[in-house]
Image (cartoon, helix red, strand yellow):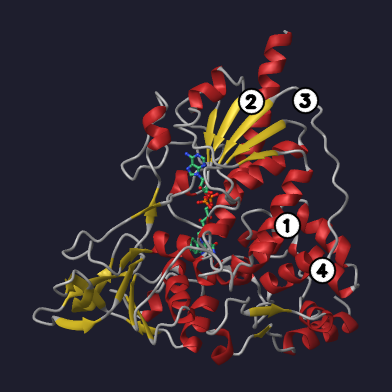
């Protein structure tokens, strides 16, 4: 590197990170509008100009869908936003979504060598929101038909990839709206539904046929998709929508919700707009949320917006081990969510009318690291106490619904109810049936679900080409 180059690099290293503007916390807990407001053009260029444009960029290692990060950042500096978007779309068909919800601090940004990692996620969001999508060309030049089950990020990504490769794609969704967790789980203040709609419209513009209100495994079985509807392959991306429960006394009391039920009522059924929409959802003054992942944070922040005076996360490990995205933890705390660390629930207590009124808990301490690499929580003897509550939301993880496994002969599952599959291709134990996303891995992340969709699309395409070749010889 010449002297000028070295000087420029030093200048870039010294630049401080630009943060996106956000709605003020006192204001935002009274509405469901998006919290983070995105970069202005000036902010985006300033942030992009901190990128060191490394010769061997490490950030690439941290992106499961292989976005060419330095290349799109360079285009922002040059003011070529449409070009930047083209670069991202080459490998990521849902950038407005990943730019908002990816845990960047554990992915691309973790590998960034700048002392203050570049806000890659915020820049991706800026490009997705402000750049034009290139004209779509509907290909469908092959005779093959592929069925996709589930319209979450994994199904949508696989559909887009296969449509771009020229296959005829039909996507089946059981709910009345598309997007999977992006629509029914993640709240409007974090994932505006208009963004999900735009991404779904893009997938439709590629020629993918979408159908709602179809429960695969009941309305149509996977067997029927293959044998009667004559699909060449099926990709199952039905997610992990069945909630886990604690199995403690009092879990069926009034006022106790699973996170899935609570968030579905609020988001998919628009309970936060009651009575404009006719789904009632009420919370008491004191709400306890059990668990500390993204789902728990979303419940805690939603409860405040619905009028709770207190919203407490009950978590058996310490705050440093919380699995939620860093940004969500910071936003939740700013809004007044209290993190009750090292606390484990033992029983839910009810009044004579069957309403939950208390949570019997015990204090925990941390022991040695367990298989997850985190320190194991250990109960402290005689530390029980009662925590008064009016609403409890259980957010301790989800698992796949077993309907498809039960109605598709020969489709093997693991003891966690996920499908046995090949990690590189998504191939299941049955010919022509592939899977990916949460139904394959258990509850994970949007970007991993998308990565699986891409890999399976490639594998399905190759399988079909191979079959064609064999039939020709
Ligand atoms: C509240 C919440 C917040 C989250 N926050 C984040 C976050 O900030 N960042 C992040 O990266 N990840 C987050 N996640 C995790 C992430 O959303 C999931 O990992 C991801 O959505 C999985 O994608 P998927 O396509 O595999 O499944 P899903 O998104 O679950 O989609 C599956 C779809 O299949 C449909 N379906 C199911 N069974 C059938 C059937 N038999 N027939 C037809 N359709 C069917 C479902 O209705 C659903 O629409 C969050 C999850 C939740 C619940």
| Marker disc for residue 463 | 2
Say if mark 1 contacts mark 2, CB within 8 Å.
Answer: no
First in sequence: mark 1 vs mark 3: 3
Q: Between marks 1 and 3, how big is the CA–CA gap?
A: 26 Å
Q: Position of residue 158 (x, y in %)?
A: 64, 42
| Marker disc for residue 142 | 3
Q: Position of residue 73 (x, y in %)?
A: 80, 69
- The residue where tag 1 is placed is 198
Q: Between marks 2 and 3, how big is the CA–CA gap?
A: 14 Å
Label 4 or label 1, whichever lies nearer to me, is 1
Q: Between marks 4 and 3, how big is the CA–CA gap?
A: 33 Å
- The residue where tag 4 is placed is 130
Residue 182 falls left or right of residue 170: left
Question: Which residue appears at 69% of the width and 56% of the height?
Answer: 197
SS of the residue under disc 3: loop
Instruction: Classify the position of the C terminus by image quarter.
Output: top right
Q: Position of residue 25 (x, y in %)?
A: 56, 89
Determine crowd level at label 4: few under 14, some 14-19, many 20+ residues with C-alpha closer than 10 A. Answer: some
């Amino acid at each position: 590197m010449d002297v000028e180059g070295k000087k420029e690099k030093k200048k870039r290293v010294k630049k401080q990170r630009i943060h996106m503007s956000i709605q003020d916390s006192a204001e935002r807990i009274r509405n469901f509008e998006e919290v983070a407001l995105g970069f202005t053009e000036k902010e985006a260029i300033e942030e992009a100009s901190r990128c060191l444009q490394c010769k061997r960029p490490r950030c690439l290692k941290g992106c499961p869908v292989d976005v060419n990060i330095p290349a799109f950042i360079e285009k922002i500096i040059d003011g070529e936003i449409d070009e930047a978007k083209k670069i991202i779309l080459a490998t990521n068909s849902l950038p407005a979504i990943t730019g908002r919800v990816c845990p960047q601090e554990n992915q691309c940004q973790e590998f960034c060598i700048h002392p203050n990692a570049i806000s890659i996620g915020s820049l991706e969001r800026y490009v997705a929101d402000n750049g034009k999508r290139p004209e779509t060309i509907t290909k469908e030049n092959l005779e093959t038909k592929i069925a996709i089950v589930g319209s979450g990020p994994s199904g949508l990504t696989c559909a887009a990839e296969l449509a771009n490769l020229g296959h005829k794609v039909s996507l089946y969704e059981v709910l009345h709206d598309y997007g999977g967790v992006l629509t029914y789980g993640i709240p409007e203040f974090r994932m505006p539904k208009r963004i999900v709609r735009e991404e779904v419209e893009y997938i439709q513009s590629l020629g993918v046929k979408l159908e709602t209100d179809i429960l695969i495994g009941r309305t149509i079985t996977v067997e029927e998709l293959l044998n009667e509807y004559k699909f060449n392959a099926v990709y199952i991306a039905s997610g992990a929508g069945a909630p886990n429960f604690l199995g403690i006394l009092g879990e069926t009391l009034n006022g106790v919700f699973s996170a899935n039920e609570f968030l579905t009522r609020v988001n998919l059924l628009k309970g936060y707009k009651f009575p404009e929409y006719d789904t009632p959802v009420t919370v008491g003054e004191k709400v306890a949320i059990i668990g500390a992942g993204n789902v728990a944070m979303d419940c805690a922040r939603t409860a405040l917006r619905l009028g709770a005076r207190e919203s407490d996360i009950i978590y058996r490990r310490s705050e440093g081990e919380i699995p939620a995205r860093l940004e969500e933890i910071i936003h939740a705390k700013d809004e007044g969510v209290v993190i009750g660390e090292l606390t484990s629930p033992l029983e839910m207590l009810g009044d004579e009318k069957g309403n939950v009124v208390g949570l019997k808990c015990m204090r925990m301490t941390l022991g040695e690291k367990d298989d997850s690499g985190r320190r194991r929580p250990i109960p402290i003897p005689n530390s029980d106490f009662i925590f008064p509550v009016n609403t409890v939301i259980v957010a301790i993880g989800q698992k796949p619904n077993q309907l498809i496994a039960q109605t598709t002969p020969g489709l093997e599952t693991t003891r966690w109810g996920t499908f046995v599959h090949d990690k590189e291709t998504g191939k299941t134990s049955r010919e022509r049936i592939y899977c990916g996303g949460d139904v394959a891995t258990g509850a994970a992340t949007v970007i991993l679900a998308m990565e699986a969709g891409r890999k399976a699309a490639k594998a399905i395409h190759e399988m079909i080409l191979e079959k064609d070749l064999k039939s020709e010889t």
